[in-house]
Image: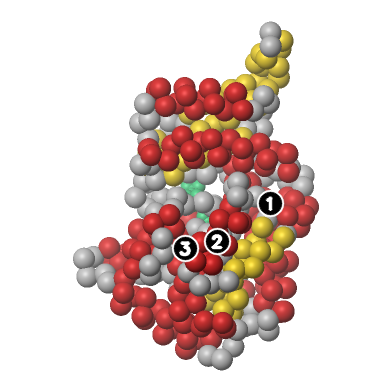
Amino acid sequence: MGRRIRMKVLSKKFNPHIYISEKVKEIKNMIGDDLAVTALSGGVDSSVVTMLGHKALGNQLKAYFINNGLMREGEPEQVVAVFKKLGVKVEVVDARSKFFSALAGISDPEEKREAITQTFYKEVFQKLVKTHQAKYLLQGTILTDIEETAAGIKRQHNVFAQIGIDPQKAFGYRMLEPLIDLRKDGVRRVAKALGLPVAVYQRMPFPGPALSARVIGSVTPEKIDLVRKVTLIVENQLRKSGAFQYMAILHNDRVTGMREGKRAYGMQIEIRCWDSLDARKAYPTKLPFSVLTKLADKIVAACTEIVSVTYNIASKPPSTMEAV
Ligand code: XMP
């Protein structure tokens, strides 16, 4: 089925405007006179869903940005501002302590992902849906999320029904997933057709578990602060690289380095920068060596805890794009 849909989406006949009007109709029919809740992360998938929901439901749609403490620098404010311009009111929910408590002491990658999922869906969304007596959570799950989860590669944070979990039973509400038949390239075309700004429709993917997917081992607010600081440097330096996605990963192991002539048992950052079409396969971008060394210089200058910076040169597969 996925293959057939992909053919449809990527064929020249795919018309994002027709897609939009069909999806708007579908959402209207499903929600009727009820309210629906949507959680917006600012990524292209959730932005498209929010705009489709807004077109279909107007004030019947309640849009939230969940501040889980794991987002990038300035992200909550930026997302709210972008959608304000588009006429969509987005409320920020401060859930930082909930997420950090759920992640405390967990270092296994799939357990970390599960903790994030449960906190989002059981703790945060459930309360929002109940508050509004909404039946549905509108969310931006796409085909690639399902494929990787179903294949047992990585538990994507937003996949349930497709792997046999009934959201109604597990969390007490249903999910409406209008983008389930698209991959990232299709979503970007719909985003553009919806009039979303270029910064949104060309926005680099960012995972649901956010910066916790970029910390190997247990997650603490301090480690997230460090990886957030490095992420800003990496994103600024590689913005013009044309790559599909780039990121900084904080390793768990320390290595010996030196600072001010003294031994420093410091932390390690791994840079990943990927060329990819749809995230199913990915190849390390052939960045000029001068770009890499400049990046390393900036990172070790800004973060005294870090003494080692490496660049990943393996492809996906067998690598995955995120480290967790
Ligand atoms: P991986 O690491 O699986 O990543 O090769 C493929 C693409 O998916 C993004 N990613 C996620 N997106 N929820 C998401 O919405 C998740 O749990 C998740 N995990 C990974 C990743 O950033 C890359 O673009």
On the image, the x and y values in percent for residue 281 come to 38, 46
On the image, the x and y values in percent for residue 16 come to 31, 71
Q: Residue at x 57, y 62 (%)?
A: 80
On the image, the x and y values in percent for residue 296 come to 52, 25
Q: Is residue 181 left or right of residue 209?
A: left
Seen as rendered, the residue at the extreme top is: 261
- Is the C-beta of the residue carrying label 3 under 8 Å from the nearest atom of ligand 1? yes
Between 162 and 235, the one lying in front of the other is 235
**Amino acid marked by disc 3:** Asp
Contact, CB < 8 Å: mark 2 with mark 1?
no
Establish if 195 lies above or below 305.
below
Establish if 213 lies above or below 248.
below
Crowding near the residue tagged with mark 3, few <14, some 14–19, many ≥20 C-alpha atoms within 10 Å: many
Q: Earlier in the sequence, mark 2 or mark 1?
A: 1
Q: Residue at x 34, y 68 (%)?
A: 193
**Amino acid marked by disc 2:** Ala
Q: Which residue is mark 1?
A: 69
Q: Which residue is mark 2?
A: 81
Q: Residue at x 65, y 50 (%)?
A: 70
Between 149 and 321, the one lying in front of the other is 321
What element does badge 2 sit on?
helix
Marks 3 and 2, how far apart at CA: 18 Å
Q: Which residue is mark 3?
A: 45
Q: Earlier in the sequence, mark 3 or mark 1?
A: 3
Establish if 318 lies above or below 186.
above
